[in-house]
Amino acid sequence: MSKRTRLAAVAAALLGVLALTGCGNSTPLDNGAQSAGSSTGASSKTIVIGSQDYYSNEIIAEIYAQGLENAGYKVDRQFRIGQREVYLPEVEAGKIDLFPEYTGNLLQYWRPDTTARKSDAVYQELVKATPEGLKVLDQAPATDQDSYTVTQSFADKWKLTTIDDLAKVTDPMTLGGNSELQTRPYGPKGLQATYGVKVAFTPIEDQGGPLTLKALNDNSIQLANISTASPEIKANHLVSLQDPKGLFLASNVVPVASKKLDGKAVAVINKINAALTTDDLMAMNAQSTKDQKSAATIATAWLKDKKL
């Protein structure tokens, strides 16, 4: 190799190193050491935030995202992912850094045999059950419980106020809900084991939305799994049956986070959660379903109203 050729090769190699160095410094999800942060004190790394395929959960995720952006963090929104069986493995693998969850359902996912039922006991056990590499932040006052819900006419006909009362129904009953409900601890098997009530099951994949409501009103199902923060319960004169035996665990809104969230980011999310109430959730859910407002618009207004 001539001297000129050798010099050209060295120059090309140096340029390659410089190019790689530049790319490495600008990549948000670089796996190297965390940078010191921007002038705001926030990390230069991007925080990936996910949400369920459920409008209420997306609103909470958007509130988290805007709160962190307001504090100087970069955010990558990965919303409407799906149900717990789909997204939690991604969270556990470190591909998602922050996800709004619900204490009771999350605990039952990790510990199906848990005996905790009340809010504080569920949260304390959840903290212990959280896998290594993840942490649950402070739970919110806001709850969004699963519930077994019937039409007012069905409740009146059989004099139903609690899930226990379903034992009085002599006609065959069908439960409707997302397909995952069939195998969850509070699904048909749990209903029979806890209350002695046997039901058929039909999957309706809209999280208590219009298809579920139509099936209830058409009497093609008699029982539906609808969250207690859904504005559809009041709007459609439905009855959420009381759960005296604790088939459904207390389910406060709770963020599950990776270790990527530093102390400042954790403080931002905990402050948001402390301000989030069940009434807030119901009002925001109504803005989504009735007023057709976007999650971003709803979240911005809520943060402004709470001075966050």
Image (cartoon, rainbow, N blue to C red):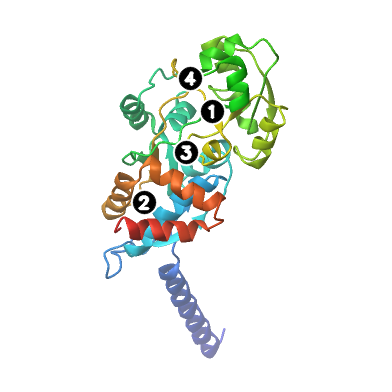
Find disc 3 in the rendering and name its residue.
Answer: 229
Judging by the rendered image, the residue that carries numbered circle 2 is 260
Q: Earlier in the sequence, mark 1 or mark 3?
A: 3
Q: Quadrant for residue 139, please give it.
A: top left
Residues under labels 2 and 1: Cα distance?
Answer: 42 Å
- Mark 2 vs 1, N-terminal side: 1
Say whether disc 4 or disc 3 marks the residue closer to the N-terminus: 3
Nearer the camera: disc 4 or disc 1:
1
Mark 1 surroundings: few (<14), some (14-19) or many (≥20) residues within 10 A: many
Contact? badges 2 and 1 (CB < 8 Å): no
Query: Residue 5, image x and y in percent?
Result: 55, 86
Callouts 4 and 3 close, C-beta under 8 Å: no
Q: Considering only vertical position in the picture, is 160 above or below 278? A: above
| Mark 4, residue position | 247
Packing grade of label 3 (10 A; few <14, some 14-19, many >=20) is many
- Residue carrying label 1: 239
> Measured from the top left, where is residue 174 in percent x and y?
68, 22
Q: Amino acid at mark 1?
A: Val
